Structure formats: structure tokens, C-alpha cells
Amino acid sequence: MRGVAAVAVMVTHYTKQGSVPGGYLAVDLFFMLSGVVIASAYDQRIADGMTSLRFMRLRYVRFYPLYLVGLLGGLILGASTVPVTPTMVIMSLAMLPTLPLVPYGFLYPPISVAWSLFMELVVNLGFVLLHRHLTQRRLLAIVLAAWLVITWGAITAGSLDIGARSPSLMFGFARTIFAFCFGVVIWRSRTSLTLALSPWIVLPLVAAALALPAPNRVFTDLFIASVLWPILVIGGSNAASAAPVLGWLGAISYPVYCLHIMFANKGLESSPVPAIIAACVGVIIVSWLADRYYDAPVRAWLLGLRLPARATLSSPPKAGEK
């Protein structure tokens, strides 16, 4: 699911506006899947005593190597939406939003998609700090409250394409909290959620939902984010499939998301379709190589260097752990 969603985001940024009308909804799917994965990987470990510092170090190790490549690529290729300053570079290198510098623009001008990484890290921090208080009932209350906020945001903006720019910061956090906490609820309810859908049904449905044109984006977006995505996440999580292509799609999803943006706004949207396809294929190949020969080895090295085994409460996570 993540791979299809990441490719949809790339196509959205490389083609004319409206070519993938709901491409921005891929972010909500990412957040929900992240909630499932984080809960499955860390719920018990946090309950057993994993410290907040260790958890957040693992999250930064997961995000930073590819973020750094996307950031440097964006700076070198001039992908920034505003003039680059030394302060902006320093803040971006620290993975901090440039909110004071661009009060009405993207939170991360050189790598605009990084707003979602920042918000997920903030929500991850809240998750680990409040973990012992996050019962199912409280999580459901948080999900409902966040849903009301994103509904307000969607009605105000005309769609759920909110959160990447500073004026809609509150709504971006609401989107993250809603989908992430919903994902945690799904994981914790897994024994009572028996729906199982074949990946070959789920993946086309994800692609169709993102490409769906709709006269009423507010209703459509809210339906996809709060009804369709949970159904597909539940169904996909319960399905068993060993098809190698599914693992490959998952592996390239984050590299595609981080690396494609450095080539956006380079006139691709006005290029012939074959050129756009070639660009997308090129990014996918580079992403696969980056995952295999850069990201995984660098994360393994960072985990070994920064987080020695004696500091863990259980065996250290593998380099590919979320």
C-alpha cells in the first residue's frame, strides 16, 4: 500500500494539477499504516520499559538518512520554494521546520514533503510519552476529536489537502493524530477484526481512490480518509501474501517519497507523457538502489554506533525496522 501511495504522490508532483486528484490523501494512508506498524513493533517494548529517548532515536535513525539526501538534493537542484538562507539550511539539517522564516509558505521549502515527517515525529513523541495512558477508549476519543478538526479544516479549505503550509499547521497535526491513532486502534483490535482482503484487491483500490475525480472533494476526502483507508488497512493487514513484489513496493515507498521531490517544479508537468514516465521510472530505480545500498547500511551503522546492544531491553531492531 505504501509503495502505491508513494508513487501516486510522485505522479501528483510530476504532472499537471488534477492528474491525480486525491494524491495528497496518500499521506493519511501513510500515517495510518505507521500507527499499525509502530504499535506492532513498539507497544510491548514501551510497556516493558523502553525509554522515550531510545524510541525517538530509533525514529530519527529511520527517517534521517533519506531525508538528508532529499534535502541536499533539493538545495543543490534549487527545489526550494523561497530563497535559501544559512538559517534555513541549519534548521533543515536539524530536521526542524522553517516556520519563523516562511510564515505563509511550506514548512520545509527545500523538501516540501518533509512536513509529514516532522508531524509524525511529534506525534510519535506524544505516543511514547503518553503510552501508559493511551487506552483504547482514550485513543478512540482522540480519533473522534481529531476527525472533527480535520472535518472543519476540509470544509474551510475545500479538501483535505491541508497541513504542508504554516497557515494550516493545526489541521496538519489533526490529520496526523487522527490517522496515526486510528492505526494504533486497528492494531490493538486485530483479534476482533477478521476482515482479510487480497493485496491484489487492496492495491488497485488504493490507486483508484487516489485517482478518483470528485465534484465534492470535502465529502470524498473525508470518506476515503476515515472509512476507506481503515477498511483497506484492516483488510490488508490480515491478508497473507509472500509475493516478492509486495515487499519491494514497501521497501521503495519511503525513498520514493523523500527523493522524488527534488525533481519537482522542473517543468515536468509540461513535458510529454513518455518523459514523465521515464522520470518516474528513474526515481523508482534510484530509490531501490538507495534503499539497498545506502539507507539500510547507514541505518545499520547508526544503530550499531549510537545504540549499542547493552542499552536495549531486547534485541536491537534490524536496519529496516520502522
Image (tube, grey):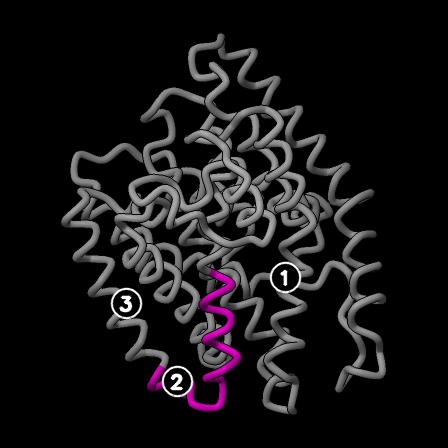
Disc 3 and disc 1: Cα gap in Å?
A: 25 Å
Residue at which label 3 appears: 146
Mark 1 and mark 2 lie on one chain; the one further toward the N terminus is 1
Q: Nearer the viewer, residue 153 or 19?
A: 153
Q: Nearer the viewer, residue 223 or 155?
A: 155
Disc 2 and disc 3: Cα gap in Å?
A: 15 Å
Looking at the image, which residue is at 26% across and 48% down? 167
Callout 1 amino acid: Tyr
Label 2 crowding class (10 Å Cα cut-off): few <14, some 14-19, many 20+? some
Residue 82 is situated, as x and y percent measured from the top left of the image, at 42, 31
Marks 2 and 3 close (CB-CB < 8 Å): no
Residue at which label 2 appears: 136
Looking at the image, which residue is at 55% across and 11% down? 274
Q: Closer to the camera: disc 1 or disc 2?
A: 1
For residue 54, what is the image quadrant?
bottom right
> Element type at marker 1?
helix
Label tally: 3
Residue at the front extreme of this rendering: 86
Bounds of the magenta segment: 120-138
What's the mark number on residue 156? none
Mark 3 and mark 1 lie on one chain; the one further toward the N terminus is 1
Q: Is residue 73 left or right of residue 175?
A: right
Residue at which label 1 appears: 60
Q: Main secondary structure of the magenta part?
A: helix
Q: Is residue 261 left or right of residue 62?
A: left
> Element type at marker 2?
helix
Residue 39 is situated, as x and y percent measured from the top left of the image, at 55, 75
Q: Closer to the camera: disc 3 or disc 1?
A: 1
Q: Is residue 176 magenta?
A: no
